[in-house]
Amino acid sequence: MISELPFVDIPGEDESLRQSVRRFVRDYVADLPPDIRARSWLGFDAEFSRQLAARGWIGLTLPPEHGGHGRGHFARFVVAEELLAAGAPVSAHWFADRQSGPLIAKYGTEAQKRFYLPAICRGEAFFCIGMSEPGAGSDLASVRTRAGKTADGWQMKGHKIWTSNAHHSHYMIALVRTSGVPEDRQRGLSQFILDLKSPGITIRPIRDAAGDEHFCEVFFEDVELGDDALIGSEGTGWEQVTAELAFERSGPERLYSSSVLLEEWLDAIRRRARSGKELRPSDQVLAGRFASHLTVLRALSVSVTCKLEAGESPVVEAALVKDLGTEFEQAVPTLIADALAATPDEEPVPQLARTVAYLTQVAPTFSLRGGTREILRSMIARGLGLR
């Protein structure tokens, strides 16, 4: 069931991170055009991630004894919010910092924690997530990639798809079937850490409609894994992956994918006002609509962060953030494009036009990544007791 979500403020000690993060990030991206910054958590820049790590802004939620900073989820929320609002290229470290590291910290062996977590915190270990498969989509319980027990460990065979940045990553955490058949659904699933340089792994990038290649297909042909690759216990993968999805779906990354475009459009309105032209009432109404929606969504996301901070696993509440947040993210480019089209006699600023064009192309993916709208709404309905 969906539990009560309290209205909370970010603690002052975590809020105090904001200004230093904002100054650093704004300076770093100052020369990047908005259509490039709009790629943000799809933008790969290993040097940027290393500089963040050097400032202590990666691994904020991870334990100090393994290289982390023990600051908790509110601190990470502040840093993530500033990175996304500025359109920083975060994807090199993003998955490791957001979910792979916390997953290993919670379920991994002591040896796994000692090996992987310090490297994540230094910005030296990049992870991708092996969940989706051809023919399965967001239905994770129907995965067919298998790992069978051998005398020396495990042997893995199968195929993952839509794996962001697999071609840039060092490691993958994969959800695979270790017993039974796909019809067994959640039973018999396990998670493994894979070194992507291992023999038998083939990675093929997928070019999207905008010409980018951040999604990949990954093929596993009799990949040999040691026993130390298993995370947690054999057969507990479903419990682990649902906890992981609570990290993935609840944060500010589900609110700010269109933030660079929104800021560019607001800047265009401000420039119009400074030039002495009258503000259009329709633009004022739309700006108010964006502000009110984002304010409520942000408060919801902060409330779910409070539950993560308390050690809970708010899976259904996170699904709510993700569903409503991506709906907002998709609405921004559509409504701004409509607003610009309503004044065909005025040419939009070229960089604003390019940013609208880019986000219009990629916005449909916002409700696919991290779970489709249909899957999420089914989870929410069950949480509300409606099915």
Image (cartoon, rainbow, N blue to C red):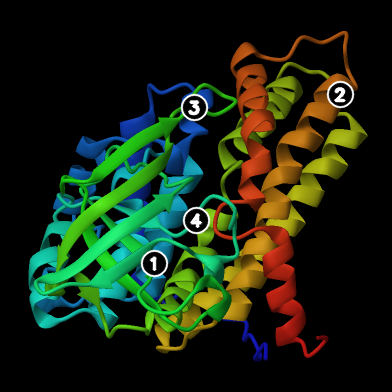
**Cα gap from disc 3 to disc 1, whole angstroms:** 24 Å
Provide residue 206's location: percent of width, then percent of height: 46, 31
Question: In the rendered image, which quarter is residue 64 located in?
Answer: bottom left
**Cα gap from disc 4 to disc 1, whole angstroms:** 9 Å
Answer with left or right where residue 136 lies relative to residue 343: left
Tag 4 near tag 1, CB within 8 Å: no
**Cα gap from disc 2 to disc 4, whole angstroms:** 50 Å
* Residue located beneath label 2 in the image: 278
Label 2 residue SS: loop
Q: In the depicted view, which residue is nearer to us: 217 or 368?
A: 217
Q: Residues within 10 Å of mark 1 (few under 14, many from 20)?
A: many
Which residue is located at x 50 percent, y 45 percent?
85
Q: Residues within 10 Å of mark 3 (few under 14, many from 20)?
A: few
**Cα gap from disc 4 to disc 3, whole angstroms:** 17 Å
* Residue located beneath label 1 in the image: 175
Tag 2 near tag 4, CB within 8 Å: no
* Residue located beneath label 4 in the image: 132
Q: Mark 1 or mark 2, which is nearer the start of the sequence?
A: 1
Q: In the depicted view, which residue is nearer to us: 218 or 343?
A: 218
Which residue is located at x 35 percent, y 75 percent?
178
